Each structure stands twice: as structure tokens, then as C-alpha cells.
Image (spheres, helix red, strand yellow):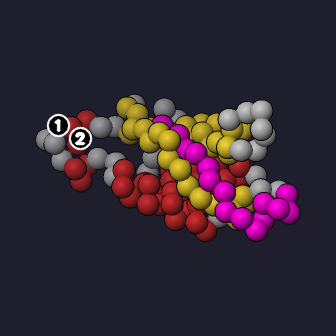
Amino acid sequence: MDTVFIEGLEVDTLIGAYDWERGIRQCLHLDLALGWDIRPAAQDDELDKALDYARVIARIDGFAQASRFELVETFAERLAACLMEEFGIPWMRLRVIKPGVNPRVRGLGVEIERGCR
């Protein structure tokens, strides 16, 4: 299984468990590794056989805009399920980082892996 990756994607969403967080949008940083067989696209240099990065990013943006979760865990789990179902991705690793949560760390978050490699 090959890996297509999207690194350092920033999305704004409504996320947080505290009252002050429920009224503001916050930035999350996402790193994705997506299992994908690149051979069909690479064989004849055919874009339509590749995983469409632009569509994946657009879907992530739409998901983030519509989300209203308290936990980054929920955001990660639901986003992974959404992408795997909509794009037929058999395996993925998703890292969701919420910066600025604690002044002593650059960011906090979760990393999940779903599907089969």
C-alpha cells in the first residue's frame, strides 16, 4: 500500500468543551497519511486515477466548517470515517493538533489510525 500525505493543513472549526470556546472558531492543524495504490495513476500519468488532493482538502474544509464538537477525539474519528467512506480510502492515519490550549506546549491533540494497510 502506498501513502499519499497531506501535511500541515489548517482548518477553522468550532471545537472545545469550555463555555468560552463554544462561541469562537479555532484553528486545528491536520496531518494525514492516506493509503492509496498510486500505480494505476502513475502507469500512464493519468490524473483521474489518482487520489484527488484538492477534493480531499475541500471535503475536510467543509467538514470543519460544519463541525460543532467538544472533543478533538470526536473530530478525528468522524473526519476519518467521512474521508474513508467518500473517497474509498482503505487505510489512514490522522493527526489533529489543537494549538494554544496550554501555554507550556505548542499543541495538544490525537493521532488515530483506521482501516487496513
Left or right for 38, reference 92: left
Residue 9 location, x and y as percent?
A: 50, 47
Q: Was residue 94 drawn as part of the magenta stretch in this picture?
A: no
Q: Is residue 98 above or below residue 79?
A: above
**Residue 12, image quadrant:** bottom right
The outermost residue toward the left is: 44
Q: Nearer the viewer, residue 102 or 49?
A: 102
Instruction: Residue at 38%, 58% (x, y): give it.
Output: 55
Q: Is residue 109 visible?
A: no
For the N terminus, give its image quadrant: top left
- 107, 110: nearer the viewer: 107
In the displayed structure image, the side of residue 84 where residue 22 appears, left or right: right
Tell whether 86 sits left or right of 72: left
Residue at the spot of label 1: 43
Residue at x 63%, y 60% (from the top left corner): 13
**Which of these two is toward me, 67 or 82?**
67
Tell me the SS state at disc 1.
helix
- Tag 2: Cα neighbours inside 10 Å, few (<14), some, or many (≥20)? few
At 73% across and 33% down in the image, what residue appears? 105
Residue 116 lies, with reference to residue 55, above or below; the image says above
The residue to which callout 2 is attached is: 40
| Residue 103 spot, x, y in % from top left | 77, 38
Would you identify the image quadrant in which residue 98 lies? top right
Identify the residue at image location x=21%, y=38%: 42
Amino acid on which the number 2 mark rests in the picture:
Pro
Is there a contact, CB below 8 Å, between mark 2 and mark 1?
yes
> Is 43 located above or below residue 77 in the figure?
above
- Within 10 Å of disc 1 (Cα), the crowding (few <14, some 14-19, many 20+) is few
Q: Amino acid at mark 1?
A: Gln
Q: Position of residue 17 (x, y in %)?
A: 82, 56
Q: Residue furthest right?
A: 19
Magenta part of the chain: 18-33
